[in-house]
């Protein structure tokens, strides 16, 4: 598979800071491209929301570099990524809980992370950020861990009541607030020419499924610039409709026909990170030790909004 991706984030109309953080990381392997998309919506007083979401995003970035090559060597499947995401989620949760206890503050974040590889996606999810699959139909892959969503699923609220309910921001599950973390894990088949959208609640609150389909179904020809324009247009639309929260979104699409994957180095006896002395553009390897498999970084994009780290 070969992936096209784009993103947009906006502070919104009233917030003094952007507590959303996101990441897009992509590498070329001997089996094609692999892409990790992460969306986090932080919560907490002052700058602590930014810190919570940044902590989660940076932990997944580190996992992409340090653990993912080992997963590729072992052979990626749903069981392996479920275990990896579960362990990583618990580590992030522990770090945020300990920080909050030490600093007498409460901070947390939503977390929606999708790994795209070959013809499959694997997702870890906590909170009310969302992951959508958009083609001829719109399918919400993730479920909201919110009080209103619970009332809707139990038949206590209608869709219209849920849409207008003032409790829609009350979350039942987040990363960093409680000692135990219950992360949903979802996996499925990546469909060519289908858009996958990860977004914070500020993005989806004022958009209908019909609008998501109309504006985010895969354009032809697909291009990152086109994706970016559509995400920006919808962001401005929800701002005009009264959204006051931060607004962030990621859009990913697998191309239907892609050239055969080329490994970064077909000579397995050679260090894949060994530089060519004649290559003026050669860069130092990112790994502290050579990757156990050919793993060529194509994209490393992280959007965070605080300098503080845990």
Image: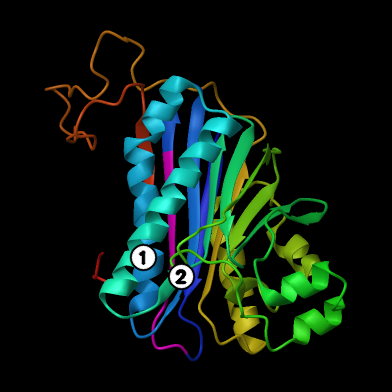
Q: Looking at the rendered structure, which numbered label has been put on residue 96?
A: 1
**Count of numbered circles on the image:** 2
x and y, in percent, of residue 31 in the image: 51, 22
Residue 40, given in percent of the width and then of the height, sits at 48, 64
Is 17 included in the stretch rendered in magenta? yes
Q: Would you identify the image quadrant in which residue 208 lies?
A: bottom right
Q: Is residue 188 above or below residue 310?
A: above
Determine the secondary structure under disc 1: helix
List x then y, in percent, for residue 179.
45, 63
Q: Are marks 1 and 2 in contact (CB under 8 Å)?
A: yes
Which residue is disc 2 drawn over? 177
Pointer 2 local density, CA inside 10 Å: few below 14, some 14–19, many at least 20: many
In the rendered structure, which disc, 1 or 2, sits on the residue that comes first in sequence? 1
Segment tinted magenta in the rendering: 15-26
The residue depicted at 77 percent of the width and 50 percent of the height is 135
Out of 47 and 242, give the one closest to the viewer. 47
Which image quadrant is residue 279 in? top left
């Amino acid at each position: 598979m070969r992936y096209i991706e784009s993103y947009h984030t906006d502070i919104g109309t009233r917030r003094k800071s952007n507590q959303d953080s996101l990441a897009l990381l992509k590498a070329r392997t001997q089996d094609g491209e692999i892409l990790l998309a992460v969306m986090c919506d932080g919560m907490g007083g002052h700058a602590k929301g930014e810190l919570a979401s940044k902590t989660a995003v940076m932990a997944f970035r580190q996992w992409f570099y340090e653990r993912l090559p080992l997963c590729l060597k072992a052979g990626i499947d749903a069981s392996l990524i479920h275990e990896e995401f579960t362990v990583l989620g618990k580590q992030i949760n522990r770090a945020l809980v300990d920080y909050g206890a030490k600093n007498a503050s409460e901070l947390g974040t939503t977390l929606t992370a999708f790994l795209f590889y070959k013809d499959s996606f694997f997702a870890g999810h906590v909170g009310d950020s969302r992951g959508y699959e958009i083609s001829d139909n719109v399918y919400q892959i993730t479920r909201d861990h919110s009080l209103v969503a619970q009332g809707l699923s139990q038949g206590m609220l209608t869709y219209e009541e849920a849409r207008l309910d003032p409790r829609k921001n009350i979350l039942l599950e987040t990363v960093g607030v409680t000692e135990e973390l219950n992360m949903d894990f979802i996996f499925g088949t990546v469909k060519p020419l289908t858009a996958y959208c990860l977004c914070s609640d500020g993005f989806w609150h004022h958009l209908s499924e019909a609008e998501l389909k109309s504006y985010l179904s895969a354009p032809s020809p697909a291009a990152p610039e086109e994706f970016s324009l559509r995400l920006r247009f919808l962001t401005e639309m929800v701002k005009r409709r009264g959204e006051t929260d931060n607004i962030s979104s990621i859009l990913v699409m697998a191309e239907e026909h892609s050239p055969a994957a080329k490994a970064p180095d077909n000579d397995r006896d050679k260090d894949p990170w060994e530089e060519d002395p004649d290559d003026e553009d050669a860069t130092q390897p990112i790994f502290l030790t050579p990757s156990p498999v050919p793993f060529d970084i194509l994209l490393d994009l992280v959007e965070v909004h605080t300098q503080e780290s845990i």
